[in-house]
Amino acid sequence: MDRRLSSTWWTLKIALGAAPLLAGLDKFFNVLTNWSDYLNPRALELVPVSADVFMRGVGVIEMVVGLLILTRWTKLGAYLAACWLVAIAINLVAMEKFYDIAVRDCLLAVAAFALARLSAVRQTSEVSSDATRLEPSPRGILSLNL
């Protein structure tokens, strides 16, 4: 992969991996914000738990997605993050509040999708470069080039 694309890939990988990991962890402490404020009250009608317990579950999912992005499952984690971010934006729009955050999450979803696509290209280029290096010699294994 081109070095310029590689640096872009690493930037997106670290940023989009660390953000959900840290935000997910904060669902247990509410240091950054009170996360329950962003939860549509209608969602609580569907689950038999309190808002705090629900948000801790959300936090666990976000930490898993962040870890997937930061490890060798970047492509899978990035696709999951993109879907997750769109779902959050839909939740916020359905609440008829926090439109600015919904727009931001849609843009982050686009960035996560871009990371997933770059990861696919990166995987393809790694496989093709490995295949090129492992090609057998046309003269055979015991040929001497004298």
Image (cartoon, rainbow, N blue to C red):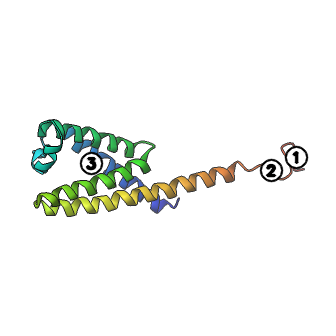
| Left or right of residue 10, residue 60 in this image | left
Q: Nearer the viewer, mark 1 or mark 3?
A: 3
Q: Position of residue 124 (x, y in %)?
A: 56, 55
Q: Residue furthest right?
A: 146
Percent across and percent down for residue 140 are 85, 47
Q: Residues within 10 Å of mark 1 (few under 14, many from 20)?
A: few
Of 54 and 25, which appears nearest the observer?
54
| Residue lying at 57% horizontally and 56% vertically, measured from the top left | 125
Q: Name the secondary structure under disc 1.
A: loop
Q: Label 3: which residue?
A: 19
- Closer mark to the observer between disc 3 and disc 2: 3
Chain-order first, disc 2 or disc 1? 2
Which amino acid type is shown beneath numbered disc 2? Ser
Task: Indicate the amino acid at tag 1.
Answer: Ser
Q: Toward the viewer: 11 or 121?
A: 121
Residue 137: which disc?
A: 2
Q: Position of residue 80 (x, y in %)?
A: 35, 50
Question: Which residue has dot 1 on it?
Answer: 143
In three-dimensional space, the C-alpha distance between marks 2 and 1, rounded to whole angstroms, equals: 9 Å
Residue displayed at 45% across by 62% down? 4
Quarter location, residue 21: top left
Under mark 3, the amino acid is Ala
Residue plotted at (51% across, 61% down): 2
State the SS at label 3: helix
- Indicate the secondary structure of the residue bearing disc 2: loop
Ranked by sequence position, the earlier of labels 3 and 2 is 3
- Whether tag 2 and tag 1 are in contact, CB under 8 A, the answer is yes
